Image (spheres, helix red, strand yellow):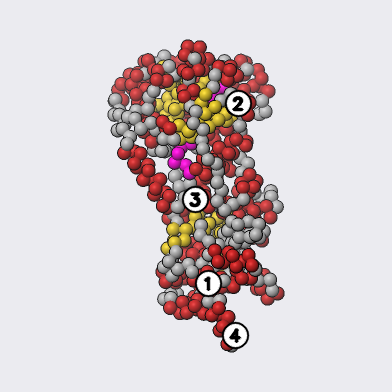
Amino acid sequence: MLGTKVIQKILRIDRVLKDYDQIEKSDDVQQFIQNTLSYYNINLEYIEEHLERISSSGPTVVVANHPFGGMEGLILPYLLLSVRKDVRILANPVLKAFPSLDSLFLYVAPYQTQEAYRNNIQATKKAFQWLKSGGMLVVFPAGEVSHITWNNWTVRDPNWSNSIVRMVRKTNANVIPMFFHNRNSSFFQAAGLIHPKLRTALLPSELLNKRDQTIRISIGKKISYAKIPFELNDTEIASYLRFRTYMLAQSPSKGAIATAFQKMIKAKKKMEVITAHRGTKLLITELNALPKNQKLDQAKDFEVYYAYAAQIPNILHEIGRLREKTFRRVGEGTGKSIDLDEFDQHYIHLFAWNSTRKEMIGAYRMGLVDQIVAEKGVKGLYTRQLFTFDEHFIQKIIPAIELGRSFIRPKYQKNYASLLILWKGISKFIVQNPRYHTLFGTVSISNEYSNFSKHLIMDYVKRHTYDQNLSQDVRPITPPKGKMKLKEMEESLLYTFIQEIDDVSEMIADYEVAYQGVPILLKHYLKLGGKMIGFNVDPDFQNAVDGLILVDLRKTQEKTLKFYMGKEGFDQFSQHHPSSQDKAS
């Protein structure tokens, strides 16, 4: 008996038990956990809106890293019970110190004994039954606490058990990744290097030393059962779920978000007031004066036109005004009262118009490269302000159209028809001028994206969609600095599980606060077969990263061109470019 008390004192189990006696009890599990967190003065930092990512019903497995070996088993149910009540947790027996939570836990011991093995099998069976009944199960698939090793000095989970994959597969469960940004003490990490059992022995102490800490948690987006890559084997899928969880390590803290917001506010204070609208009547007068052939397409009340600057001084003023207003909303913009420059005078303006509401939807700026270079040289091209290239490069890509300064005003951005009418307009313009076969220009990555996201996008593009030949002829004026820095994750996993631009987009949507993934225009260009040529930072556009991208329409899939050009338009284009008919459909 004396020996047990001595061991409990050494391992500080006695202190955990004393603390439990002092914590105010409650029949409500969530309330008891709140009392426990308050007793230890533990604050939780997470984005409240991301609680909406948690499924409110149906079989769901929550996977998380295992940095503490105890406290996370209290924190996760506290958050999850605010969304749904049918929560169970596969937890470490150290939490038996809190008997008020017994109904919540299915205990899984990290010990290699026969008794632990038998108990773990029973707990796993109960977990299966719970999921099959439609419940939510919280799992720490590492099976042991995050730690350093002699081979790797980053605190992280070891490889995850593939038993979690069998649970998901057999119960058709969705998966929600969650990530803890904190870790156990340095003493704990050092002790584990001496012997793994020392880590286990120190778990009660680590439970106690979380007092007065702020623990930060990131909640990932739901990975639906249908999107889990079951073509992989169970070990690879477990690695994928671990990867998705550790990608959340890139999530910015609330402090970083607040700092970025303050910078944005300060930047906006320095910006000029956007110029006023000149009046709808002036716009309609100019619109009605355009030749009929400059109306390129119409879909219900959405119309698309092209015009020259001299034809539309007031419409161009409205385009410049709305450009600036739209770009500022995403951390870009010139900061001037209107976004118009010298290039607008010799470029063509393609714009979409709502004929019912009598207002602008969005616009593109188009430059006929061969004409501009013949009249003004390569410096007559807007892209030449961002990248250095000469006529040798131009000869490789002409006949080409430079696209840029595209925008869709915010009220229309959720309507797919807005972007569609603009792209059908560009396609119909090419049908009218079929000698042009190449589109090129810049696509922006706002500076409001985190550095990690910007570098992740650039790195993906350089690996998968980069034109090494053409890039030799182009140099950025201000090349991006730095490189992608992964937090707490092996770089090899990044390139194993990110193979498509949609994979990049899904990753970014998980941890970026303001963005739902990769910029929509970049995704669109890449799906047209676009190739990136280079990247530049634009100091006149709030330090946005501009990617110089090129789309050779002769290599775009036939079905895609027919969708935008129509069958007759595609046939006309193909007659000028016979090789385009040989593309894979």
Mark 3 or mark 1, which is nearer to you? 1
- Residue at the extreme bottom of the image, as rendered: 1
Residue at the spot of label 4: 3
Residue at image position (57%, 29%) is: 533
Mark 1 closeness class: few <14, some 14–19, many ≥20 residues within 10 Å: some
Q: Quadrant of the C terminus?
A: top right
Task: Please rate how many residues cluster around mark 2, counting C-alpha atoms within 10 Å: few if below 14, some from 14 to 19, many from 20.
Answer: few
Distance between the Cα atoms at labels 3 and 1? 29 Å
Q: Are marks 2 and 1 in contact (CB under 8 Å)?
A: no
Going from the N terminus, do you reach mark 4 or mark 2 first?
A: 4
* Residue 434 can be seen in this image: no
The residue identified by callout 3 is 251
Residue type highlighted by circle 2: Gln
Q: Earlier in the sequence, mark 3 or mark 2?
A: 3
Marked residue nearer the N-terminal end (3 or 4): 4
Dot 3, crowdedness within 10 Å: few (<14), some or many (≥20)? many
- SS at mark 2? loop
Query: Relative to 119, is 45 on the left or the right?
Result: left
